[in-house]
Amino acid sequence: NLKVGIVGLPNVGKSTFFNALTNTDLGKAANFPYATINPEEARIPVPDPRFDWLCEVYKPSNRVPAFLTCLDIAGLTAGASTGAGLGNSFLSHVRAVDGIFQVVRAFDDAEVTHVEGDVDPLRDMEIIQTELRLKDIEWVEKSLDSLKKTSRALGNNSLADKARKEEIATVEKVLKTLTVDNKDVRKADWGNKEIDVVNGLQLLTAKPVTYLVNLSEKDYARKKNKWLAKIKGWIDEHNTGDPLIPFSVAFEERLSLMPEEDREQAQKDAGCESALGKITKAGYSSLKLIRYFTCGPQEVRAWTIREGTKAPQAAGVIHSDFENKFVCGEIMSYEDLREHGSEAAVKAAGKLRQQGKPYEMVDGDIAYWKSGA
Ligand code: GDP
C-alpha cells in the first residue's frame, strides 16, 4: 500500500489541507466505504472519468474507486537532520512514505506567524531540500562504511566480492550525486542494477515530490502571485520536471466545510475550482500507480497496481488464491468498451482477449480472472 506524505515547514497549511482532504467526500455519494484509517492517515478517492462511466453503464450496487493513501507528517524545521526538535522522528516518517506532497507557503497573513520570520517560499524549499539531503548523506556514508567493512571479510575475486564492489560503486555514485553534483537522488540517471541498490537505501531525496503552492484564495482565483514564477524557476533549476500545483488551502477548507450541494455554486462564485482532484491524481501517478477495473452488476471496482505489474500479481491484489491458482485473464481495454458500447460487442469484435501469465497490465484494463480449483 503506497503512501504520500504531506511535508512542509510549520504553519504552511499542512494540517488544514489534510483536514480538507479528509472532509471532502469526493465520492461519498457513490456509496463506498470512505474511510479515514487513523487521524494521520486518509484514503482519498482518485477522480477518474472512466470509473464514473463504468458505474453509469453497469449500475452496480457497490462502487469502489481507486484511493490514494495520504499522511500528515508534522515537524520539519531547519536542523531536523541533526535531530533538532522533532527532527528524527519526522524524518523516519518521511522514510516510511513513497512520495511527498510538499506544501509551500506563498500566502501572506500577518496573523499566521512564519517559523522563519517572513514569507519566502524559495528559502523554505532550500531548507527542506537541505535537511532531506543532509539526512541522506549521513545515511549513505554509514552504509558505505559498513559495506566496506564487510567487504574486506569476503576475500578477493569471489563472486560475492565482485557483487559487493559493484554495490559500493553505486553507493559512492549516490554520495557524489548528493554532494559533488548537488542533486537529489531522484534527479540522477540510474541503470537497472543500480536502481536495486538505490531503492534498497530508501533515501529521502529519491522519493517523488509534488510541490503544492499554498496561495491566498484571492491569488488562487486570479491565478497571480508574486512568488509563483520564482518557485517555478527554482524547481526548474534544482529539480527539473517535478510537478507544481498552485492551490489555496483556505479555499479548500472553506469548500470542505460546506454541504456537498453548495460546493459547485461556491466554486462558480469564487471563479476557481477546487484543486484537490488534480492533487490526488498527481500524487497517484507520481507513485507510478495504475489501475485496472473489475466490472459487473454487483460491483464496479478499481484496483491499484504498480506500473509493469503482470496479470497474476494484478489478480493477487484481489485475493492471493487468484495469483496462486492463476489460469488466465479475460481482458478488454476501457477504450474498446467505450468504443463498442458493450462487452458482447467487444467480444464480437475480437477484442476481449485471453491473457496468460506474462501479460503486463495496462492502465484502464477491465479484467475477469480465471483461477483453478
Ligand atoms: P501546518 O503547521 O503546516 O500544519 O499548518 P496549519 O494547517 O496548522 O495552519 C497553520 C495556521 O495557518 C492555521 O491558523 C491556519 O488556519 C492558517 N492557514 C492555513 N492555510 C492557510 C491559508 O491558505 N491562508 C491563510 N490565510 N491561513 C492559512
Image (cartoon, rainbow, N blue to C red):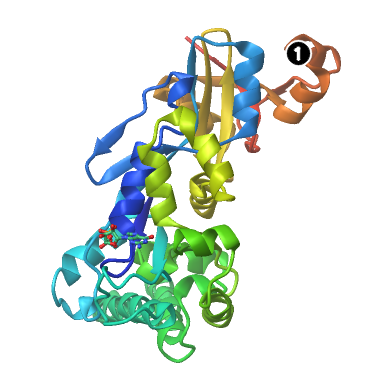
Determine the image quadrant of residue 155.
bottom left
140 or 214: nearer the viewer: 214
Residue 152, x across and y down, in percent: 27, 81
Residue 144, x across and y down, in percent: 31, 80
Residue 269, x across and y down, in percent: 55, 45
Q: Quadrant of ligand 1?
A: bottom left
Residue 2, x across and y down, in percent: 40, 46
Location of the N terminus by quadrant is top left
The amino acid beneath tag 1 is Ser
Q: Is residue 239 left or right of residue 169?
A: right
Q: Is residue 339 left or right of residue 136?
A: right
> What residue do we see at 65% from left, 30% from top?
50
> What residue do we see at 55% from left, 67% from top?
242
Q: Residues within 10 Å of mark 1 (few under 14, many from 20)?
A: some
Q: Is residue 73 left or right of residue 1?
A: left
Q: Which residue is mark 1?
A: 342
39 or 247: nearer the viewer: 247
Task: Confirm if mark 1 falls within 8 A of ligand 1.
Answer: no
- Judging from the image, what secondary structure is the residue with disc 1 in? loop
Q: Is residue 75 left or right of residue 243?
A: left
Determine the image quadrant of residue 250.
bottom left
Q: Is residue 290 visible?
A: yes
Q: Is residue 2 visible?
A: no
